[in-house]
Amino acid sequence: MTPDDIEGFFAKREDLNLEDYIELDFDFECAGDPREAAAHLGSEQSTAQWRRVGVDEDFRPRFAAKVLELQSEPRPNGFSIAVECAAKGAVHAVRVTIAHPHGNFGPKIPNLLSAVCGEGVFFSPGIPLIRLQDIRFPDSFLAAFQGPQFGVSGLREVLQAFDRPIFFGVIKPNIGLAAEPFAELGYQSWLGGLDIAKDDEMLADVDWCPLGERAAALGDARRRAEAETGVPKIYLANITDEVDRLIELHDLAVEKGANALLINAMPVGLSGVRMLRKHAKVPLIAHFPFIAAFSRLSGYGIHSRVFTRLQRLVGFDVVIMPGFGPRMMTPEHEVLDCVRACLEPMGPIKPCLPVPGGSDSAATLEGVYRKVGSVDFGFVPGRGVFGHPMGPAAGAASIRQAWDAIARGIAVADHAASHKELAAALQAFGGR
Amino acid sequence: MTPDDIEGFFAKREDLNLEDYIELDFDFECAGDPREAAAHLGSEQSTAQWRRVGVDEDFRPRFAAKVLELQSEPRPNGFSIAVECAAKGAVHAVRVTIAHPHGNFGPKIPNLLSAVCGEGVFFSPGIPLIRLQDIRFPDSFLAAFQGPQFGVSGLREVLQAFDRPIFFGVIKPNIGLAAEPFAELGYQSWLGGLDIAKDDEMLADVDWCPLGERAAALGDARRRAEAETGVPKIYLANITDEVDRLIELHDLAVEKGANALLINAMPVGLSGVRMLRKHAKVPLIAHFPFIAAFSRLSGYGIHSRVFTRLQRLVGFDVVIMPGFGPRMMTPEHEVLDCVRACLEPMGPIKPCLPVPGGSDSAATLEGVYRKVGSVDFGFVPGRGVFGHPMGPAAGAASIRQAWDAIARGIAVADHAASHKELAAALQAFGGR
């Protein structure tokens, strides 16, 4: 690129109509001049050849992605991660903010992903290492999306559960059980105090436990539990399947007795979820398979909060995400970034409920609550309820007992002295 | 895990009915005992809690993912990539092959992805770094998929192009042009000798160049070019869009004059592509946005050939992939792995055409051909045709002239002495 070529991919915020642009924060490491690398990054994700041969024209003013901010510092020891085909030259660590004109593609998820996580971003000359750190949408773009139908407040209304976390549990054994014994476990957990008993993300519509049979059995168990406890309950059925079955499975599961649906967001595809959202009658809950494959490393890939925002945008009411603690291998600051991405203002799009999960139990509830810093979260043990030595009802009770202690300002360990389910949970799971 | 727990996740091939299992090759780095880490990896991706509390049962024989092979060596210097939340302990580099029972979920893409690239794989205790290196399907699983409708031989029939590579070109400027001038560029490139003029992966159905108008203009230009040259041509229209518009856009584009369709596979979602395949009347061509985000690093993520295989499985006739040379930052061995994944036997699934691409021109054709080692590939310049100093017809001609030289055993540079389009191409692009 010539200096003039490069200049065409830089702009100042005050010279742009910011409603026309999505803003992208990238961290990258490049070989060679950081300013030229940043211009390439803008060019490759938008109008890589901005004129026809022999025609006096320039598509950059309208169509170019433009660098708004750039900071760089040398990395004398080279790239932070070895890349077999990295470019040669002096290495810099660079942070840029880029304004990408969304009129290039319109308010469509696949085209958005192609623009901001596509060839232009990951094959930009001189940039072997890059991470999309965050994304911000103008209201003009957000207006085309429905977002969550229920959101945090709608889900609380359904459950009549206010001023406290929402208590989920993953029914275990996660795969292998037939519908009836599986429903019995859910029933026990509701009696013990869970709000939401859920299918594992790996349990789908399978011949050894068909979705229709399972939803019927769990729906019946749910209504019995509601009658006995006097409070609303949710059976969260996993309808993860091919996109052309989502509507049919939604209708089947809801008709039979499921009153919320789980979808593995990335495996199904966010666009498929957006389609389902238009039809959905019940809350939609996201699970996180696949996201770690591109989000774990701090120096390459895509920050997980980008996909938290996108899951909220396409209409999930709840986003289950890797939670706190070493088990889930996600830094605390990243979990909190994802929690905020669910709850913070997003134009006309409702907040969704963050559920930071992973090997939770009565022993971890207080830590999660303190870290999140509010009651607007979901808590989702698996074995912490269904592997409780006294059974699932006791497992669920141990969670509620732990919350009672926290809410009343009593030490959880002290509360256990008079609550045997909690005591057993702390003994079984507290050492983790 | 106890030693007995661990044992339940190991098996020998001869003790399994291999038709019931998908085989997965993983490389990982773990802290602690490699054999226990491998057992966790099998457990987490299948039946993590294999019995109910108080019930004498074991779901592992039928439902467990089982380690078939394990090799490990110590890494005295620790993990190869820094991970903020990595487990502590002595580090080993481990290679395992795992047999995953596909009856756990059935022949469904989202559930397959959840199993083999999901929480179980990327959040297995003690394993912060893991890469899914390859996947093999038994015929009983493959039989549920359609695969390519045309495949390599079908595409050759459509084009009447045998015993040579298929010549694609990405019309440039890639975004910003209205339908008519865009069609004129395609027309020129067909006259010059391209088989397939294509939309860029970033050009979709947009208000400044609606798909219907574009397909009509290009369809008309294509028919004129076919009449003038006497050979079949393809206009490859990009219909990447929300999944609930794919069928509608397929019908619109084909009715107006497109005779092959481009879909950005991962942004749309492989399941959406499988749905489209059931309806498609023309060849489907995959582009590769998003894949690099999880495939570039040798020590983490998913090898790109896994997604080449999946793109073939869901029905793509052509897979465009990052090609050779430093520009695309993909090691030669990995490009060749992906080429083979398109062409090698895959049960009842037809071969698809590999198109290794990236900054190609007449100057790079011979190198690509020598590396691929056969004529069964597509060649896809962008600026190498549409940035040619003499225009797109000359750009296309330069590619065909280069191929003529190669096919006749003449040095491309020598052939340029009597072919001015080729000479200009080598001068403009040869230094890259």
Image (cartoon, coloured by chain):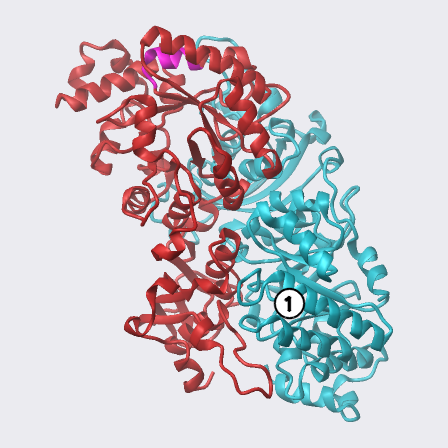
Chain colours: A cyan, B red
Characterize the local packing of mark 1: few (<14), some (14-19) or many (20 or more) Cα atoms within 10 angstroms. Answer: many
Q: Mark 1 is on which residue type? A: Gly
Considering every residue shown, the one lying at the far bottom of the view is A417
Q: Position of residue B110 (x, y in %)?
A: 52, 53
| Residue B304 or residue A232, whichever sits in front | A232
- The residue that appears at 46% across and 64% down in the rendered structure is B103
Q: Position of residue A207 (x, y in %)?
A: 53, 63
Residue closest to the eye, B250 or A26: B250
In the image, taking residue A50 as reference, residue A82 lies left or right, namely left
A200 up-or-down from A420: above or below: above
The stretch of residues the image draws in magenta is: B186-194
Q: Is residue A261 magenta?
A: no
Q: Is residue A224 above or below residue B25?
A: below
- Residue A21, can we see it? yes
Tell me the residue at 49%/72% (across/down).
Answer: B125
Asked if one can make out residue B25 in the rendered structure from this viewpoint, the answer is no
Which residue extends farthest left? B409
Q: Chain of mark 1?
A: A
Give the quadrant of the N terminus of chain A: top left
Query: Picture coordinates of residue B380 (x, y %)?
Result: 36, 27
- Residue most extreme to the top: B228
Residue behind mark 1: A357
Would you say residue B191 sits in the magenta stretch? yes
Left or right, residue B119 beside residue A275 = left
SS under mark 1: strand
Q: Is residue B51 above or below residue A85?
A: below
